[in-house]
Image (cartoon, rainbow, N blue to C red):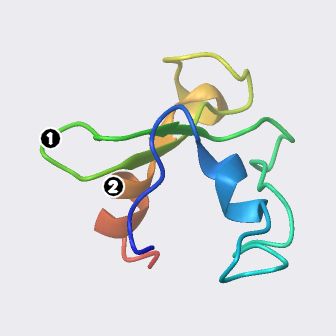
Amino acid sequence: EDRYPTSDEGLEILAAPSDAMTDGILNKVPVDPWKHPYQYNKPGRNGRPYEVICLGADGREGGEGPDRDITDADVEEAGGY
């Protein structure tokens, strides 16, 4: 089934086996560079179909410098995809 996961399913569903993918799409649930789980929202902000968020070094919303939140939209704007 081609669809984005729901917010309740989160990224974890992508590592779960299914009829189509016996090993899941991902081999494990990803974590950010500080070993915190990524936040996932569907729909995302600003009309995006979904949003993946790294909460920075402190693992909490907001912050500056290394504690700043980074979204998939920020990465895309910076040319990271």
> Is residue 26 positioned above or below 52 on the image?
below
Q: In the image, which is nearer the foreground, mark 2 or mark 1? A: 1
Give percent across and percent down for residue 57: 74, 31
If you read the primary sequence from the N terminus, does the residue marked by circle 2 or circle 1 appear first? 1
Give percent across and percent down for residue 31: 78, 49
The quadrant of the rendering that contains the N terminus is bottom left
Q: What residue is shown at x 72% (from left), y 70% (from top)?
A: 18
Q: What residue is shown at x 29% (from left), y 41% (from top)?
A: 44
Give percent across and percent down for residue 28: 86, 62
Tag 1's secondary structure?
loop
Give percent across and percent down for residue 78: 36, 67
Asked if marks 2 and 1 touch (Cβ < 8 Å), the reply is yes
The tag on residue 73 is 2
Q: What residue is shown at x 79% (from left), y 55% (from top)?
A: 29
Q: Residues within 10 Å of mark 1 (few under 14, many from 20)?
A: few
Residue that numbered label 1 is attached to: 46
Q: What's the CA distance linking mark 2 and mark 1?
A: 10 Å
